[in-house]
C-alpha cells in the first residue's frame, strides 16, 4: 500500500502556524517529546544493536550487555540493585505485573487491598479485576486538601491488608502524596502489607528512592521522561517473588518473558540520567513558571478556579473555567496550535474525570476543568500567549454561572 502524502507530512518538530507562531505543547503529563539525545541514541543503536540479547553469539552478547548497563544506570539513579529492575512495555504493564504478580505469588498475604479513589486507571482497573477474583478493595476518599484522607486510612488498615498502592504524584492535579507519612501508618497498622508506588509522574522530578522508603514495588514509564513509548520499568524489592503475567522464553528471570529491547532500555536509562542531572534546575524553573502562570491568570480578569492542591507538583496545573465545556476550549486552543488536555488521556472517551469527581468541589467546577502541563522548555512568552488565547476564548465559551473562586465547595 502506498503512503499518502498527508501521512508523509507528519513531523515531530514544532511547525510554525500561519501567524508564524510555533506550536505550544502543554500536555507533557500525557506524553513528552523524546529528548534529542535520546532520539540520536535510538537511531544510532538501532543500526548496531539489533541482535537478540539471548543469542549466544557475540552480537547477542553485546545486546545483552547494553541491557545490563541500562539496568545498572537506572538502578544507580533509583538507589537500588540492577537485579531489582524489570523492563516492561510501560507503566500500565508494570502496575499490572506488580499488583497481580505479587498477590498471585503470595495468596495468603491478606485479602484487603487499599488505594486512592483518584489513582490512575491502570491501578483502579487492576483493582477492579482483583475484586472480581474475590479481593476486598478499599478506595480512600479525597480530603479538602485534594489528598487521600488519612483518617480513612487508619480505619482501613485495621483489616488484614495484603497490598497498598499509591502514586507519588497524581497525574490530573499534581497532588504530591505524603508517602513518608503513609508508609509510617502502614508500618504501624499493617506491617505485613506490600506497598506499590506508581512513580510515573514524579520520576526524575521528585527525589524517589524506593528502597530507602521501604516500598516493595514501584512503576515507571519511559515516555513521561523524554524516552520513546514502549518502555517502562518495575522495581521489585530483592527477595519478593512475583508470578509472571505471561509465559514464554523465560527472559528477565522468568518474570517478564519476551525478547528484551536493548535500544529502548538504553533510551530510558539515558533519558533518566539526563533528567536527573538537571532536576533541581528544572524544578526551580518550572516552579517559577507555575507562579507566573497563576499570576497572569489572576490578572486576566477571567473567572477561574485552581483545582490542584496548594503544594502540588508544578508540572501539573488543573484549572476550571466554570461554565465552559472543556473539550470546546481544548479545541479552540488547538486551533491556535496550543495543546492542553481536559483530563488524563488514558481515560479515553470518558467525559468526566474520576479524579475531580472524588474531590470536594462543585459540579460546575468538576465539569469545566483543563489540565496544563508545564516543563522547562516553556518560556514566559509562551505563558503570555496561552493566557492571551484564554482571554480571547473563555469569555466567548463561558456560559453564565454563579460559581467563582470563593464558592469552592
Ligand atoms: N500512572 C500514571 C500516574 C500515569 O500518568 C500514567 C500515564 O498517563 C500511567 C500510570 C500509565 O503509563 P503508561 O502510559 O506508560 O502505560
Image (cartoon, rainbow, N blue to C red):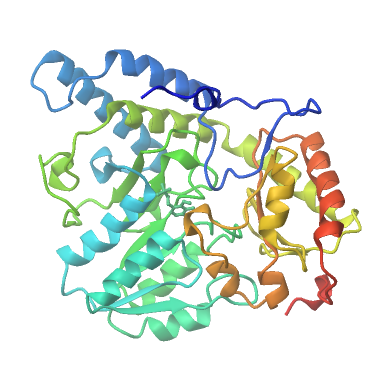
Looking at the rendered image, the quarter that the N terminus falls into is top left
Q: Is 57 displayed left or right of 213 in the figure?
A: left
Residue 234 visible in this rendered orientation of the protein: yes
Residue 114, relative to residue 314: is it above or below?
below
Residue 150, relative to residue 81: is it above or below?
below
On the image, the x and y values in percent for residue 129 come to 29, 69
Residue 138, relative to residue 44: is it above or below?
below
Could you say which is closer to the camera, residue 409 or residue 389?
389
Q: Is 152 displayed left or right of 343 in the figure?
A: left
Looking at the rendered image, the quarter that the C terminus falls into is bottom right
On the image, the x and y values in percent for residue 70 come to 32, 30
Could you say which is closer to the camera, residue 351 or residue 8?
8
Q: Is 116 displayed left or right of 248 in the figure?
A: right
- Kindly identify the residue that appears in the image at 49 percent across and 59 percent down: 347
On the image, the x and y values in percent for residue 403 come to 81, 75
- Kindly identify the residue that appears in the image at 77 percent across and 63 percent down: 321
Residue 318 visible in this rendered orientation of the protein: no
Could you say which is closer to the camera, residue 222 or residue 207?
222
- Kindly identify the residue that appears in the image at 16 percent across and 75 percent down: 108
Locate residue 25: give its quadrant.
top right
Amino acid at each position: 500500500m502506498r503512503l499518502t502524502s498527508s501521512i508523509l507530512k507528519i513531523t515531530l518538530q514544532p511547525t510554525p502556524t500561519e501567524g508564524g507562531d510555533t506550536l505550544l505543547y502543554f500536555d507533557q503529563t500525557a506524553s513528552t517529546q523524546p529528548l534529542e539525545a535520546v532520539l540520536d541514541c535510538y537511531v544510532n543503536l538501532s543500526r548496531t544493536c539489533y541482535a537478540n540479547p539471548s543469542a549466544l553469539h557475540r552480537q547477542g552478547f553485546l545486546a545483552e550487555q547494553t541491557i545490563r548497563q541500562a539496568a545498572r544506570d537506572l538502578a544507580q539513579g533509583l538507589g537500588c540493585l540492577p537485579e531489582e529492575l524489570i523492563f516492561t512495555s510501560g507503566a500500565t504493564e508494570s502496575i499490572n505485573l506488580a499488583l497481580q504478580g505479587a498477590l498471585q505469588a503470595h495468596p495468603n498475604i491478606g485479602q484487603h487491598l487499599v488505594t486512592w479513589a483518584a489513582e490512575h486507571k491502570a491501578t483502579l482497573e487492576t483493582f477492579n479485576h482483583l475484586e472480581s477474583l474475590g479481593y476486598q478493595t478499599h478506595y480512600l476518599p479525597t480530603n479538602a486538601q485534594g489528598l487521600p484522607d488519612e483518617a480513612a486510612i487508619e480505619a482501613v488498615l485495621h483489616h488484614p491488608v495484603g497490598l497498598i498502592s499509591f502514586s507519588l504524584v497524581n497525574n490530573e492535579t499534581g497532588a504530591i502524596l505524603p508517602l513518608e507519612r503513609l508508609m509510617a501508618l502502614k508500618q504501624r497498622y499493617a506491617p505485613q502489607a506490600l506497598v506499590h508506588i506508581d512513580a510515573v509522574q514524579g520520576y526524575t522530578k521528585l527525589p524517589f528512592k524506593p528502597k530507602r522508603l521501604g516500598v516493595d514495588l514501584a512503576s515507571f514509564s519511559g515516555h513521561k521522561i523524554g524516552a520513546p513509548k514502549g518502555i517502562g520499568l518495575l522495581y521489585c524489592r530483592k527477595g519478593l517473588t512475583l508470578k509472571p503475567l505471561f509465559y514464554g522464553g523465560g527472559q528477565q528471570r522468568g518474570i517478564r518473558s519476551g525478547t528484551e529491547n536493548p535500544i529502548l532500555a538504553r533510551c530510558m536509562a539515558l533519558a533518566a540520567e539526563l533528567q536527573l542531572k538537571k532536576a533541581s534546575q528544572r524544578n526551580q524553573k518550572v516552579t517559577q513558571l507555575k507562579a507566573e502562570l497563576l499570576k497572569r491568570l489572576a490578572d486576566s480578569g477571567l473567572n477561574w478556579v485552581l483545582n490542584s492542591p496548594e503544594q502540588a507538583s508544578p508540572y501539573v496545573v488543573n484549572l476550571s473555567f466554570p461554565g465552559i465545556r472543556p473539550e470546546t476550549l481544548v479545541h479552540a486552543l488547538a486551533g491556535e496550535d496550543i495543546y492542553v488536555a481536559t483530563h488524563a488521556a488514558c481515560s479515553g472517551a470518558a467525559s468526566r474525570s474520576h479524579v475531580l469527581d472524588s474531590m470536594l468541589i462543585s459540579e460546575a467546577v468538576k465539569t469545566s476543568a483543563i489540565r496544563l502541563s508545564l516543563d522547562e522548555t516553556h518560556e514566559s512568552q509562551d505563558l503570555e500567549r496561552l493566557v492571551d488565547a484564554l482571554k480571547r476564548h473563555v469569555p466567548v465559551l463561558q456560559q453564565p454561572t454563579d460559581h467563582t473562586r470563593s464558592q469552592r465547595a
